[in-house]
Image: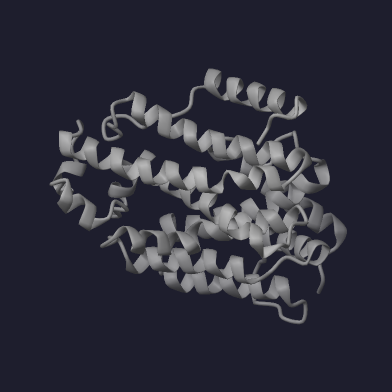
């Protein structure tokens, strides 16, 4: 039985509430975006949040639950298929957004795969292995957002991937302690050895000199990715350009906060203050309206 319009509108409303309820460095789908675009962004977030919650918090067989999540995804992309049980709100919204925007399936599947990897892999040997993980955990989000805004040119993907990977890595460096509490370490083992940082060092309340040097090195790589992705801001237009610039600059401001704290993220999680967020928004808007946002 197909959902009616009221069911779909309630689903979008649930995704919107979920988006606003969860902490983010910068808001998803800000009021700068047109309302009809925001609803699609809420649907994407509802999907991504749901699959991440399964991978991080589900109390049970997470791999089986991820299979269940994928079954609902396939149903949202194929109206002739209907998995049993109650359909999560995210999929009613995704189903409508998919049909309106012709969203690609593959990025959604990669987000599920990232969470499957999290159940099997808790350590990464090299930087290259970590970047490969980001092709599933981060890059698909940027490609879906590009599709929401009508950008289908694949030449934009390398820039989008660079920004999304940089944002994902920034989150890892911000949340070393949180990830460790879940048994995960995203700092590559090879780099930890080079800077003489042990897993025991990560559990300290105060960072060692080796840890600070390690994080500074990883952040330099991350800043380079933000720089590589920056041309995308000039290749899109309108309110999307502003939103993209805010996300990119917001991520870099987290790196600034980590640096200002002496590269010690173990004792206290660095955040962007409300004053800094407000300043970023105002300066970004000013640059946009004066034609200097690039």
Residue 216 appearing in the image: yes
- Residue 204, located in which quarter of the rendered image? top left
Locate residue 148, reporting x and y percent: 74, 55
Q: Residue at x 37, y 66 (%)?
A: 119
Pick the front one: 185 or 209:
209
- Residue 234, located in which quarter of the rendered image? top right
The image shows residue 279, relative to residue 184, as above or below, that is above
Pick the front one: 111 or 165:
165
Of the 4 image quadrants, the one containing the N terminus is bottom right
* Residue, far right: 5
Q: Which residue is drawn at 65% across and 27% down?
A: 284
Locate residue 55, reporting x and y percent: 44, 60
- Residue 129, located in which quarter of the rendered image? bottom left
Indicate left or right for 93 with 166 as reference: right
Locate residue 260, reporting x and y percent: 35, 24
Q: Which residue is drawn at 51% across and 48% down?
A: 228
């Amino acid at each position: 039985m197909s959902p009616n319009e009221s069911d779909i509108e309630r689903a979008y409303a649930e995704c919107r509430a979920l988006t606003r309820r969860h902490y983010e460095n910068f808001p998803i789908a800000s009021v700068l975006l047109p309302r009809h675009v925001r609803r699609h962004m809420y649907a994407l977030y509802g999907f991504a949040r749901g699959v991440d919650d399964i991978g991080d918090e589900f109390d049970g067989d997470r791999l089986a639950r991820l299979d269940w999540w994928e079954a609902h995804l396939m149903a949202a992309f194929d109206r002739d298929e209907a998995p049993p049980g109650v359909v999560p709100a995210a999929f009613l919204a995704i189903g409508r957004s998919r049909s309106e925007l012709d969203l690609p399936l593959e990025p959604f599947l990669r987000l599920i795969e990232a969470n499957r990897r999290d159940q099997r892999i808790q350590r990464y040997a090299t930087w290259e292995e970590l970047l490969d993980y980001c092709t599933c955990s981060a890059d698909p989000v940027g490609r879906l957002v590009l599709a929401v805004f009508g950008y289908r040119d694949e030449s934009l993907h390398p820039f989008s991937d660079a920004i999304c990977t940089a944002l994902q890595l920034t989150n890892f460096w911000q949340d070393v302690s949180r990830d460790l509490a879940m048994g995960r370490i995203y700092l590559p083992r090879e780099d930890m050895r080079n800077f003489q940082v042990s897993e025991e060092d990560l559990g300290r309340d105060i960072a060692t000199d080796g840890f600070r040097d390690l994080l500074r090195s990883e952040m330099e790589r991350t800043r380079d990715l933000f720089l590589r992705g920056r041309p995308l801001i000039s290749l899109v237009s309108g309110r999307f350009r502003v939103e993209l610039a805010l996300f990119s600059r917001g991520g870099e401001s987290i790196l600034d906060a980590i640096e200002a704290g002496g590269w010690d993220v173990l004792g206290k999680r660095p955040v962007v203050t409300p004053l800094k967020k407000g300043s970023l928004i105002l300066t970004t808007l000013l640059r946009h309206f004066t034609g200097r946002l690039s």
